[in-house]
Image: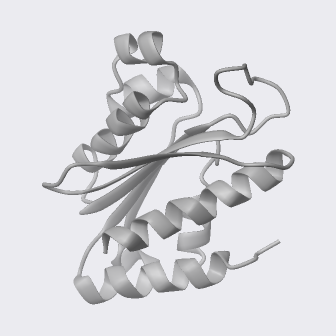
Amino acid sequence: MDTGLTKYAADLAGRLHRAGLMMATAESCTGGWVAKVLTDIAGSSEWFDCSFVTYSNQAKQSMLGVRAETLEMHGAVSEAVVREMVAGALARSRADLALSISGIAGPGGGSPEKPVGTVWFAWQRAGMEAVTACHRFDGDRDAVRHQAVVVAMRGALALL
């Protein structure tokens, strides 16, 4: 079920390489899928630094520096948390550009305020403010995650 992942990854790789930039990802609900697609490209070590797969709240705190207060006040699937995740990814890597993702892929875990399919994203270049977005995707767990990977790469491309 590629539907454009390879194309987005190749576009992103080309732009990062030409600009001499390094990238990092901080992923929760996608479980490293963005990093996998990007590192499927031969030579990706020239422009891809690392990925933080921080599925648990504890991992978000210890690996990315997300504050316990932020998680408690806003929940893991929130703008505040993805902002802290992307900032942590930049601070803890050699990356010039990072993205973060946190969402509810389902089939359970949703609520009326945050239904299954809710995914928050943040993208940030070093020295700039983060850009955030929230999307609500339809479909099963795999479909939600796939759509999140596409949006994540599109957002990174937009910052380049």
Residue 20, horizontal then vertical, whole percent: 23, 81
Q: Residue at x 61, y 60 (%)?
A: 149
Q: What is the quadrant of residue 127 in the picture?
A: bottom left
Residue 57 higher or lower than 15, as above or below: above
Residue in the foreground of this view, choosing between 94 and 88: 88
User: How is this picture coloured?
Assistant: one colour
Q: As drawn, is 44 to the left or to the right of 90?
A: right
Residue 63, horizontal then vertical, whole percent: 39, 33
Q: Residue at x 50, y 69 (%)?
A: 154
Q: As drawn, is 92 to the left or to the right of 31?
A: left
Residue 19 higher or lower than 66, as above or below: below
Residue in the foreground of this view, choosing between 121 and 62: 121
- Residue extending farthest to the front is 112
Residue 144 visible, this orientation: yes
Residue in the foreground of this view, choosing between 6 and 116: 116
Q: What is the quadrant of residue 136 in the picture?
A: top right
Residue 69 higher or lower than 24, as above or below: above
The number of callouts visible is 0
Residue 60, horizontal then vertical, whole percent: 45, 29
Q: Residue at x 41, y 66 (%)?
A: 156
Which image quadrant: the C terminus?
Answer: bottom left
Residue 41 visible, this orientation: no
Which image quadrant: the N terminus?
Answer: bottom right
Q: Residue at x 46, y 10 (%)?
A: 72
Residue 141, horizontal then vertical, whole percent: 82, 45
